[in-house]
Image: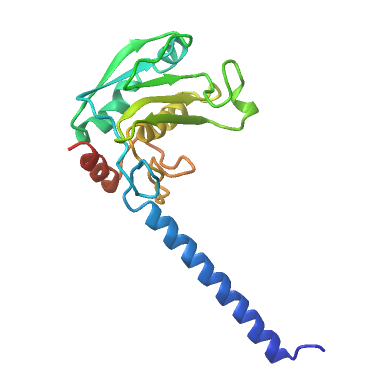
Amino acid sequence: MALSRTNKLVLGLTICGVVLAITIVVIALAEKRAACGHKTTEGDCQGEPVKFCDDIIQIYMDDEAAVDFDGRLAPILDVYQPHIDAKLEYAGSLPWTAHQPARSIWITRQNPDAGPNVDWEDTGETGSESTTWDANGCVITSLVGISRELEGKDATRILCHELGHSLGLIHSSVARSIMYADYGGQACKLTEKEQQVLQGLYP
């Protein structure tokens, strides 16, 4: 039996209302998960905060990254340092084949997610960050990879984003933020909330 015009209108409005309600719930849940603004051991702001627990956070680069980011790492660290009560220290370069020192960040041009000498374009990624931590949320190692396809400001911007993850920040829902999920922001700058989150993690 065909629906009348009125019934069709009511059905259409009902479907729109359900879709709108679902969208609102999804957005609310996403905001709740990101409310604390930082990683936690159990995810969704549950458990211990994930952070470096030492007074000095040593940062290494493999030989290729050390050449590519020469002179560009220090300004990025200057963005984060004022909000962290731990010294961010560049400790030098290490070959990719070396063992990463504990409680450190290691920056590479390799693709950590795909293995050595795998082209970034084959995976469709431009950057990655992989961090391990202990039961207390203290970081053991953090590995940051930046695509060889990126140069100049783009490479610097992605490195700034991934280092934010290494230090404990999660994705932001603010498009202008350097921590926006789709690599937002045109400059390596932190929002006021991100500054506050870091200050809370590293008081």
User: Image quarter for residue 141?
Assistant: top left
Q: Identify which residue is drawn at 47% across, 24% down.
A: 145
* Quadrant into which the N terminus falls: bottom right
In the depicted view, which residue is nearer to us: 28 or 187?
28
- Location of residue 6 with respect to 15 vertically, above or below: below
Q: Identify which residue is drawn at 34% across, 53% down.
A: 35
Q: Is residue 48 left or right of residue 132?
A: left
Percent position (x, y) of residue 92?
33, 11
Percent position (x, y) of residue 172?
39, 47
* Quadrant into which the C terminus falls: top left
Q: Identify which residue is drawn at 40% across, 29% down.
A: 132
In the depicted view, which residue is nearer to us: 120 or 168?
168
- Location of residue 100 with respect to 40 vertically, above or below: above
Tell me how the rendering is colored. Answer: rainbow
In the depicted view, which residue is nearer to us: 28 or 176?
28
User: Image quarter for residue 138?
Assistant: top left
- Location of residue 15 with respect to 58 vertically, above or below: below
Outermost residue to the front? 135
- Location of residue 81 with respect to 9 vertically, above or below: above
- Number of disc labels: 0
Percent position (x, y) of residue 104?
33, 21
